[in-house]
Amino acid sequence: MSNILEVKNLTKEFKSSSRIGEAKSLVKAVSGISFELKEGESLGLVGESGCGKSTTGRMIAKLLDPTDGQIFFNGQDISKFSEKQMKPIRGDIQMIFQDPFSALNPRQTVGSIIGMPFTVNKIVPKQGLKTKVQELLELVGLNPEHYNRFPHEFSGGQRQRIGIARAIALNPKLIVCDEPVSALDVSIQAQILNLLNDLRKELNLSLVFIAHDLAVVRNFCDRVAVMYLGKLVEVSSADEIFNHAHHPYTKALLSAVPAVNPLNKKSERIHLSGDVPSPIDPPSGCRFRTRCWKAQEVCATTPPALLQVGKSSVACHFPE
Amino acid sequence: MSTFLEVRDLKVDFPVEDGVVHAVNGLSFKLEQGKSLGIVGESGSGKSVTSLAIMGLLKESSAIVSGEILLDGQDLVAASESDMRKLRGTKASMIFQDSLAALHPYFRVGKQIAEVYKSHNKVSKADAKKRAIEMLDLVGIPQPDKRFNDYPHQFSGGMRQRVMIAMALSCNPKLLIADEPTTALDVTVQAQILELLKSIQKQFGTSVILITHDLGVISEFADDVLVMYAGRAVETGSVVDVLTKPQHPYSWGLLSSIPTLETTINKFHSISGTPPSMLNLASGCAFEPRCEFKSSVPGGKCASNIPDLIETSPNHQSRCYLDTAQRANLLTPPEFSVQK
């Protein structure tokens, strides 16, 4: 299978607002990450808040321009594309957002929200816009009769379905899902995940699935990339990550997830002390070293490269 | 051990324009001194309203509270506002989900903690400050004497949650209500905060009510668990009993629908439909419209009558008409508890 997406050395730095008399500082949100996504695959992007996973997702969808690096979509570098150049590709890369309440315009009907991709791109579906939108509503498990309703008339789970219908309207090849289920209750979460899974198979979608819930990623994604403070620390298949994690951070992250089964209490939990350092002034060398129990001198001087360890790619001087 | 908190037939109604929202409909539970109770449920199930009712934080003008809440023998539903003021902080305290919203942005955190201590104890300003620094130290904030003078925005989310815990515990309350204390935090920080709450509970013998939607957190932290649906308890029991041998179709559905690290499933079990509106509650079991097993109960009883909370095994109750034999046939235990 060919790579639908390839990201090389992707970097994003934001200028932070400065106070009077202070120099502007750079927030290093994403610092040179590279990965690829095969056609039909779903890649989970996990990490704690502030690790740059959402920024990465937004750069892939070209909602943010990268500071440096390349994004190859179907072999074509889109990282420096202008709005105009992007226009024909926009339909192929879509996004689903976390908050189904703010992602939908409250003053538009569901029909016009889902029909918007067609209107904007001046596409007239052959069966007519209304019929097409109603087909989409049915595809995501909503009543086509609700075409004229407004977003506030729907529950959170239903709104997320509307967001999904809008994202798949133009038959995209790649969808970036930014925490699509974290605002939903567990029983609804399962419905949405099942829907995404069905659509993925039906429409042969490739997914970049951004989440902080490791259990969801475990059960939903083929491959997982773990991020820490703007860097990739480990990339591997989901089975490999969850059964044989190599990077200390991945291990700590997994051990912090509370087990639901009370009979299966984790024997020893790895406690990470402190918080994630500021991305304005990240630690030298390995960015995880300030919280790592294996850190040695070399970790402070040389940033570890993402290297093959077993079946995984790991960025650590002392992988397990 | 003695019962420290007893809630009997608690009802909370909110009159609104379209009618009355029945947020809590006859909830009863007991909590022993030094024990922890987890309350789980989806949004709108009434778990937060219950905790606000215990703390007397529901406005009389907007909510109608009935039933009994006995804290250390004192009925809180009938208590006056001035009695409640004395009691909040000293007997019962609460920590909230969003620590940024719960702390005052204009005041230094140390001052906010000292204020609680001073209003309940006749102490000098200097003593109150000493107490605040002591509390900050207890919850694991480095350099507490320096951080005393910081503002809430200068703390990270996890540190702010620690400040909230310090504030809640400054007058040694016997009951701590934690409403989604770790929901806004990352897993690694969540683990730190849960560990802190556990050690504090052990040290001071505090009873804790932990409200959350995360069954993993309940499993790690609580002794007993109460599953709420549409303002009622649908199942109660010890954590091990409820999480590994759920007896109510809702708890079973909930447990089967959560992805865990131990399982790999392609198709998630999902409970169809959505929770009911609390405006017009059905006359029968509130879960009936979503229940897969309603046809197993003869005579459509589920739709017409609300089942009682029935003991299915010692200390384990479920609000369902299915009898023991039917349950054994129909309810398969959640996948994670089968896999060993």
Image (cartoon, rainbow, N blue to C red):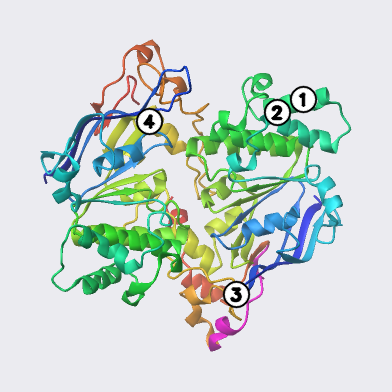
Q: CA distance from mark 1 to mark 4?
A: 38 Å
Quarter containing the C terminus of chain A: top left
Q: Secondary structure at mark 4?
A: strand
Secondary element at image label 3: loop
Measured along the vertical axis of the image, is residue B218 above or below residue A187? above
| Disc 2: host chain | B
What amino acid type is highlighted by mark number 4? Answer: Tyr
Residues at marks 3 and 4 touching, judged by CB atoms closer than 8 Å: no
Camera-nearest label, 4 or 2: 2
Quadrant in which residue B67 is drawn? bottom right
* Residue on which the image places disc 4: A228
Kindly check if marks 2 and 1 are in contact, taking CB atoms under 8 A apart as contact.
yes
Residue that badge 1 annotates: B129
Chain of the residue where label 1 is placed in the rendered structure: B
Closer to viewer: mark 3 or mark 4: 3
The mark that comes first in sequence, 3 or 1, is 3
Please report, as a chain letter, where disc 3 is located.
B
Q: Badges 1 and 4: C-beta atoms under 8 Å apart?
A: no
**Furthest residue in direction front, as rendered:** A20
User: How many other residues sit within 10 Å of disc 2, few (<14), some (14-19) or many (≥20)?
Assistant: many
Q: Position of residue B90 (x, y in %)?
A: 81, 42
Q: Same chain for labels 1 and 4? Say yes or no.
A: no
User: Are discs 4 and 2 both within one chain?
Assistant: no
Query: In this picture, which residue range is highlighted in magenta?
Result: B299-314
Q: CA distance from mark 4 to mark 2?
A: 32 Å
- Which is closer to the viewer, label 3 or label 1? 3
